[in-house]
């Protein structure tokens, strides 16, 4: 991806995280298909062969019954200003007709547990949609997603998720689903988990470097 596709003048950042800087993408939706939810998710399969969609559905169901667990699970929030990513063709930044694709994040889910050694774990999922722009074409695009567990104004865990999304010919948009189980962290004894939140969003600065 050309470095000129995203403006280097983007200035949005996540407060309290000096090491994480998120360029603010254009938030206006390109097509009306981005504005609505991406439909009901369904189709839970065999637990041994779950795909991302089925895993996300399972997370949603477990989240609805989380009051039955003894481990507080910090919420997952799509960081305001990073829920939409618009990528332009080379030398066509801010040209509405130069948009290759626009990605929008829509839903999240999660579950938490504690390992036998005392480490806290969180499995989280997210869904969204990629819409082809006027300058787009069928291709596999890499959508950069940033996740950060934040507490008391400080990020204690972060991860960049370069998510490949295949846009097929004849389809103006495609849904993406991702489930991640890499969040493992050893909190100090007595930590108040209610002060923590997992933020997710598109990393536009990372997109500009591709």
Image (spheres, grey):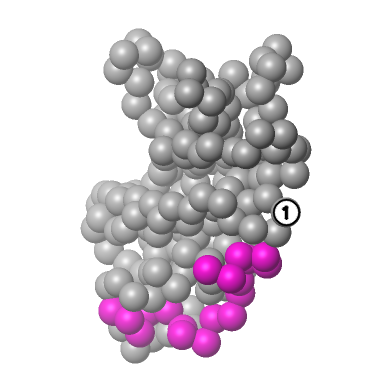
Would residue 134 be counted in the magenta stretch? no
Mark 1 neighbour density, 10 Å: few (under 14) some (14–19) many (20 or more): few
| Horizontal side of residue 4 vs 73, given as left or right | left
Q: Residue at x 47, y 49 (%)?
A: 129
- The picture quadrant where one finds residue 61 is top right
**In the foreground, 9 or 26:** 9
Screen quadrant of the N terminus: bottom left
**In the foreground, 32 or 69:** 69
Q: Is mark 1 on a helix, strand or loop?
A: loop
Would residue 10 be counted in the magenta stretch? yes
Q: Pinpoint residue 84: horizontal percent, then vertical percent.
A: 54, 61
Q: Residue at x 24, y 58 (%)?
A: 139
- Answer whether residue 50 is visible to the viewer in this image: yes
Q: Pinpoint residue 105: horizontal percent, then vertical percent.
A: 54, 51
Residue highlighted by disc 1: 152
Screen quadrant of the C terminus: bottom left
Q: Is residue 62 above or below residue 27?
A: above
Q: Determine the residue located farthest toward the front in the rendered image.
A: 189
Q: Pinpoint residue 101: horizontal percent, then vertical percent.
A: 40, 64
Q: Which residue is drawn at 32% across and 67% down?
A: 136
**In the foreground, 45 or 139:** 45
Q: Is residue 186 above or below residue 72?
A: below
Label count reads 1
- Answer whether residue 180 is visible to the viewer in this image: no
Q: Residue at x 67, y 65 (%)?
A: 16
Q: What stretch is highlighted in magenta?
A: 2-19
């Amino acid at each position: 991806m050309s470095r000129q596709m995203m403006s280097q003048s983007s200035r949005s950042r996540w407060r309290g995280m000096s090491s994480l800087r998120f360029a603010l993408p254009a938030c206006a939706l390109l097509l009306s298909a981005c504005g609505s939810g991406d439909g009901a998710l369904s189709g839970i399969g065999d637990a041994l062969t779950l795909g991302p969609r089925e895993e996300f559905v399972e997370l949603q169901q477990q989240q609805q019954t989380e009051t039955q667990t003894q481990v507080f699970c910090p919420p997952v929030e799509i960081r305001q200003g990073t829920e939409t990513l618009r990528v332009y063709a080379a030398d066509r930044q801010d040209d509405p007709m130069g948009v290759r694709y626009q990605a929008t994040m829509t839903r999240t889910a999660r579950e938490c547990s504690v390992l036998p050694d005392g480490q806290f774990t969180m499995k989280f999922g997210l869904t969204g949609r990629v819409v082809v722009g006027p300058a787009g074409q069928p291709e596999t695009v890499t959508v950069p997603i940033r996740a950060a567990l934040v507490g008391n104004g400080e990020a204690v865990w972060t991860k960049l998720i370069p998510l490949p999304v295949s846009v097929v010919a004849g389809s103006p948009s495609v849904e993406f689903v991702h489930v991640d189980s890499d969040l493992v962290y050893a909190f100090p004894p007595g930590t108040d988990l209610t002060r923590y939140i997992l933020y997710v969003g598109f990393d536009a600065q990372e997109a500009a470097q591709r």
